Image: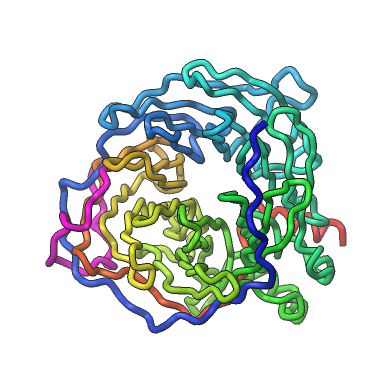
């Protein structure tokens, strides 16, 4: 199995620098020409991952996965489906599969489940996808914890080992299933064990160039050297509060932190060069003061790893219901992808948005689209000409919606955006049909909140489940 070259370890603990004043969007022009190039219904669709050539898209389908041929982005089509995975095993099949990841070098696809705790089969399945139209299952590896999210890199699977005790990142060989090593924030400070693990679950892990980016709610985002998966070591930390700060909170205050900003580190990933790291904040407003959410996308400059600086926070799209739970009308940040010049972002009911981040201090909103019946789980780059957005079914938005859909969208160059019209942070008018709301922002428009917040709060979904487990143990 190929392994990456050892990277140079970077010692010390990262601390985020303060950002500047709030900057609001300039004017934009609604442009009905911007919208999906094509789409395809994928029952149960959740996360989607684009293959290295931009042709095939791999989609978690809750009960398995599907592979879509998007070589013609105007007519994407399902070419492969695998459902009822590992049904022959005790407790099988693998259920509530919300995430999957692709190792393009090893040509391996890893699907994980269940997304939340349950008595059924827990673990991951690895497939050889060298022939995307005919994937071959290689192995199923069981785990003692549920699996909401994962990553796979250089033949190693990285899991979010939320066991209610250590909440560790756990590394396995993707093919043999051998457990290689793990890393937990308890190795930095044992006082985390005095807090409910719902406040510091490992919600997601992203691995790039030998570094794992761990999004851990109130505990912030951690960078770990995994060039030797059997012996991960800490590089540093972005964001997050200390155990002392959280221990000082009353139980009801801690419970509220599960749903509100500041914080809620949900997903973190770098640009290809690693100089900019994005941290998505999934949160909603459950308080009375209107300050709880929804959350945005924080951009950090880590070109000097010992002194990272928060450059900006891309604000969430406006919402008619800021207090809605994520996935139920909320416009809070969800999964995203950073490229050197672009940020591809998904905002649940806020749709998808494309930003120019060539200057991280002043992200430029290039284009966006949303539909009143759609709730976007992820957005990812595909080729120089199109990107994808995956919308999962949300019956709270529209009970008659036809189901989860994979959309393709054109990549908008900065030079094609236009000026004039209503402010870009005004809610687009709801569409009367599935064509949705198309609009473009002119060059130089900054839908940004630069923030002084350098702390984190906790999450939803998996976090709430972990809180219940903590209360049960008490």
Q: Residue at x 51, y 40 (%)?
A: 47
* Residue at 30% from the left image edge and 41% from the top image edge: 386
Q: Is residue 258 left or right of residue 383?
A: right
**Magenta-drawn stretch, dominant element (helix, strand or loop):** loop
User: At 18% from the left edge and 67% from the top edge, which residue is drawn?
Assistant: 422
The C terminus appears in which quarter of the rendering?
bottom right
Asked if residue 279 is among those painted magenta in the image, a careful observer would answer: no
Seen as rendered, the residue at the extreme right is 474
Q: Position of residue 106 (x, y in %)?
A: 58, 30
The location of residue 18, given as percent across then percent down, is 50, 82
| Residue 433 image point, x, y percent | 24, 41
Rendered-image quadrant of the N terminus: top right
Q: Residue furthest bottom?
A: 21
Q: Is residue 112 visible?
A: no
User: Residue 28 vs residue 88: left or right?
Assistant: left
122 w.r.t. 264: above or below = above
Q: Which residues are magenta?
A: 410-432
């Amino acid at each position: 199995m190929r392994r990456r070259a050892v990277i140079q370890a970077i010692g010390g603990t990262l601390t985020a620098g303060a950002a500047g004043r709030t900057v609001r969007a300039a004017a934009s022009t609604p442009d009905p020409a911007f919208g999906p190039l094509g789409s395809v219904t994928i029952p149960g669709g959740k996360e989607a991952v684009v293959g290295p050539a931009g042709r095939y898209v791999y989609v978690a389908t809750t009960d398995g996965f599907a592979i879509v041929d998007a070589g013609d982005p105007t007519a994407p089509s399902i070419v492969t489906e695998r459902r009822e995975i590992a049904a022959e095993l005790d407790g099988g099949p693998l259920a509530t599969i919300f995430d999957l990841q692709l190792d393009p070098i090893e040509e391996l696809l890893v699907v994980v489940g269940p997304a939340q705790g349950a008595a059924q089969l827990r673990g991951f399945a690895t497939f050889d996808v060298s022939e995307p139209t005919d994937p071959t299952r290689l192995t199923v590896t069981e785990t003692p914890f549920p699996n909401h999210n994962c990553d796979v890199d250089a033949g190693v699977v990285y899991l979010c080992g939320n066991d209610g005790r250590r909440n560790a990142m756990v590394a396995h060989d993707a093919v043999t299933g051998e457990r290689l090593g793990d890393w937990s924030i308890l190795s930095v400070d044992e006082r985390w064990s005095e807090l409910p693990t719902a406040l510091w679950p490992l919600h997601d892990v992203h691995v790039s160039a030998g570094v794992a980016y761990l999004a851990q709610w109130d505990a912030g985002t951690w960078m770990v050297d995994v060039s030797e998966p059997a012996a991960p070591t800490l590089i540093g930390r972005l964001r997050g509060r200390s155990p002392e700060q959280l221990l000082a909170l009353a139980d009801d205050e801690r419970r509220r932190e599960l749903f509100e900003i500041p914080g809620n580190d949900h997903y973190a990933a770098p640009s290809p060069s690693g100089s900019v790291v994005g941290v998505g904040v999934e949160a909603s407003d459950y308080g009375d003061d209107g300050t709880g959410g929804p959350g945005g996308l924080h951009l950090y400059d880590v070109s000097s790893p010992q002194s990272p600086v928060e450059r900006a926070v891309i604000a969430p799209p406006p919402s008619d219901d800021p207090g809605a739970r994520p996935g139920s009308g909320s416009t809070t940040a969800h999964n995203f992808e950073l490229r050197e010049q672009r940020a591809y972002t998904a905002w649940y009911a806020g749709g998808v948005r494309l930003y120019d981040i060539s200057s991280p201090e002043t992200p430029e909103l290039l284009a966006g689209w949303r539909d009143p019946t759609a709730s976007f789980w992820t957005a990812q780059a595909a080729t120089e000409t199109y990107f994808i957005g995956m919308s999962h079914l949300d019956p709270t938005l529209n009970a008659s919606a036809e189901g989860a859909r994979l959309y393709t969208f054109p990549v908008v160059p900065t030079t094609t955006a236009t000026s004039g019209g209503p402010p870009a942070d005004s809610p687009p008018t709801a569409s009367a049909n599935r064509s949705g709301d198309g609009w473009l922002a002119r060059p130089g428009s900054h839908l940004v909140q630069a923030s002084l917040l350098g702390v984190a709060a906790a999450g939803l979904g998996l976090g709430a489940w972990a809180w219940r487990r903590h209360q049960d143990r008490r």
